[in-house]
Image: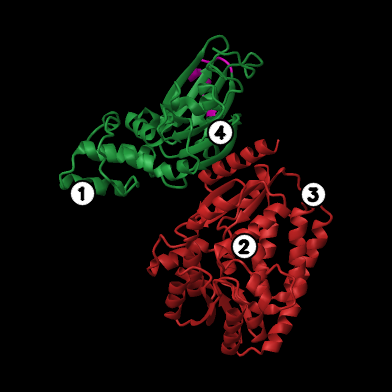
Chain colours: A red, B green
Amino acid sequence: MGNIGITTTVPQEIIWASGNIPVDLNNIFIGSDKKTDLLERAYRDGYPRTMCPWISGIYGTVVEEFHVDRMVVVTQGDCSNTHALAETLQDKGVEIIPFAFPYDSDVGLLEGEMRHLAQTLGAEWSYILDCYERLRPSRELAWKLDELTWKKNLVSGWENHLWLLQTSDFIGKAEKYLENIKDALEEVRTRKPFDQKVRLGYIGVPPIFSDLYDDIENSGGRVVFNEVQRQFSIPYPVDDFVDAYAKYTYPASVFKRIKDIKEQIEVRNIHGIVHYVQNFCFRQIEDLLFRKYLGVPILTIEGENSFELDERIRIRLDSFIKMLEDKIE
Amino acid sequence: MGKNSDYQNNKSILALDLGSRSVKIALQKKDSGIELYDYDTALFYDQFGEPSNSGFQIDFSKFGLNSKPLIKATGYGRNALNIADAEITPEIQAHAKGAIYQTGMSDFTLLDLGGQDSKIIWIEDSKIEDFFMNNRCAASAGRYLENMANTLGMGLEELSRYWENPEKLSATCAVFGESELVGKMAKGVSRERLAAGVNQQIVKKFAAKLDARPPQHLVLVGGVAMNQAITKLLAIKYQIRIIIPEYPQHNGVIGLFSENPMGGKE
């Protein structure tokens, strides 16, 4: 019993039901004071400098700062760099447990994968379903906070990002998360609404930058939709556990994501999209499909291994927001 | 000289476009016409003022001014080093406006090829419809042309003469491009064909973005607009006349004025 590392959202109920605690290693890495050192550790051990810093960062995190004995690694539905991450960590003594999301979201295949993971971890199916129910109130409050972001303009883009992001493992302390978000909701309801005119959607993996949302808000825009972070909260109020995860778009075909994003653009009255891509990520190719199908202006920004925005990205954001402002008028 | 509503409080106007290679300046003095200047970026910061708590303080006397002018700024360095008391315009907006002033057109595609940055701005009904800006590397910008010209042992002016029979190249990187050229020269490919190939690379680099909305009217600005071969190759590719305004390198700084400072059509 102990911490089980994850590298992206997985059906965490299975981990909880096995008596273990899921730990999203992305959040440990990005929350660390020593992020740059953790990346350097990966480079020292032979990771190419051209590798995505999320991958290198997780490696550095596990080796240097937050050791885990076991990791559930998504071998389908995330990137193939994850495979080499798993292999190099296996070489460091971490037990690797693979999990594959079916590309076509096939419910039968997904249930098979889930049951296989449950068996590996020794989790009972009925207890897993019970965990799904027990996490529901936390998810519902995360959705409520998301709704207050776009419907009432009471939540900043960064807060929305953080609360939704944390649902991938509920910070390893599900009850604490529930308590915290209740307090947060109470506080935001007393606020004066944000009044930025330009409403933006953020799509793509969570940013490596910590100052992106503030910069956008200072330039007169606000992110009212965080696509993947919202997906981490499995935003589908359905009773069936397998079905809920089958609806989860991130590991599936980009067309499934496009459908979800288009719906949210409509519902949330979004003027433009910021598409974040990580350097050397295969998702950069998908940018052309977003441009083809989303029907609103898109600004694509690329993160490398700096944790703050550089001038080049600031210039683009400023110009993009100004352009949208002029269009709204 | 055009009349200008910026020309208020009897003040002169100093407009700056802070680029990676040079600082472009348009100075409108109280009682005379507009003057355009161009300084090396490092030289500008070294000789035309000094840093202060409120940003870079420009020494106005260097421009022959007795009192503080109205300062307007755009460009790459505008966040990295704020110009004290400057009114800032994002550079996409500055370039769009500059090109609208300079050409008198309201619907066109603007291609700005600078030293490090390149941008495409789609303008419809005198408004920015969309824009694209190269991301973090200077591939296919002025810096690439400079490095390639050096490798070929020619100046930028000579490089810009060759467009016929371009050699196919694969790299657009300002560093890797060199080894490719050296390899080709060793195999006996002529410098002229390689120079044409280098120019062709610039066109190819932007073709994917331009092709998405084939330009009816293409306006070319930035330092690379001086390269006649690229203009020629673009004209051939899109079968249109490429419009180069009178002051392609000062396009951004001209766009900082709230009315056309050049007194042309609007």
Report the residue marked by disc 4. Answer: B123
Amino acid type, callout 1: Gly
Residue B61 part of the magenta segment = yes
| Picture residue at 52% right of the left edge, 19% below the top | B27
Q: Nearer the viewer, mark 4 or mark 1?
A: 4
Amino acid type, callout 3: Pro
Q: How far apart, in angstroms, are the residues tagged by discs 4 and 3?
A: 34 Å
**Residue B112 versus residue A26 in the image, above or below:** above
The C terminus of chain A, quarter of image: top right
What is the magenta range? B55-67
Report the residue marked by disc 3. Answer: A193
Q: How far apart, in angstroms, are the residues tagged by discs 2 and 1?
A: 45 Å
Report the residue marked by disc 2. Answer: A228
CB under 8 Å between discs 2 and 4: no
Q: How far apart, in angstroms, are the residues tagged by discs 3 and 1?
A: 62 Å
Closest to the observer: A61 or A143? A143
Q: Nearer the viewer, mark 4 or mark 3?
A: 4
Q: Say which element carries label 1.
A: helix
Q: Residue furthest front?
A: B239
- Residue A324 can be seen, yes or no: yes
Q: How far apart, in angstroms, are the residues tagged by discs 3 and 2?
A: 24 Å
